[in-house]
Amino acid sequence: MLKSELIERLAFEAKDIAETDIEMVVKTIFEAVSLALSKHNRIEIRGFGSFAPKKRHSRTAHNPKTGVKVFVPEKWIPFFVPGKELRERVNHA
């Protein structure tokens, strides 16, 4: 589902709220999650799951096309862990 599709679906469900207001709320939530992760903080949405930044250590890899060894620096990646309620809904769908 695209962000625009999410906004349309929420607007359909909540007909008394303007679509522009729903769009602002959705963008604000996504921005809050992005900001928390960029500060290396964990964010939890009860019933849905949690997002946490994980550190990947530097390593030596190889280019599969040329076989040349390449140094990959350490980096942070976003990691999602679904909540119990979400897992149950997905498994029973």
Image (cartoon, rainbow, N blue to C red):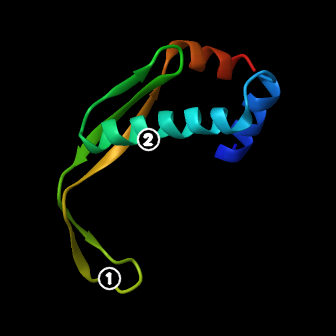
Residue occupied by mark 2: 31
Which dot, 1 or 2, sits closer to the camera? Answer: 2
Most foreground residue, 86 or 13: 13
Question: Farthest bottom residue?
Answer: 66
- Residue 57 in view, yes or no: yes
Image quadrant where one finds the C terminus = top right
> Which quadrant would the N terminus be assigned to in this image?
top right
* Residue type highlighted by circle 2: Glu
Q: Position of residue 13 (x, y in %)?
A: 79, 23
Reading the chain from its start, which is encountered first: label 1 or label 2?
2
Q: Is residue 2 visible?
A: no
Q: Quadrant of residue 38?
A: top left
Q: Is residue 43 shown above or below 47?
A: below
The residue at 49%/36% (across/down) is: 28
Q: Secondary structure at mark 2?
A: helix
24 vs 28, left or right, is right
Few, some or many C-alpha atoms within 10 Å of disc 2 (few <14, some 14-19, many ≥20)?
few
Instruction: Name the residue nearer the viewer: 15 or 34.
Output: 15
Q: Position of residue 40 (x, y in %)?
A: 24, 38
Counting from the top left corner in percent of width and height, residue 85 is at: 57, 13
Say which mark, if any, is on residue 67.
Answer: 1
Position above or below: 92 against 58: above
Q: Residue 70 at x, y = what percent? A: 23, 76
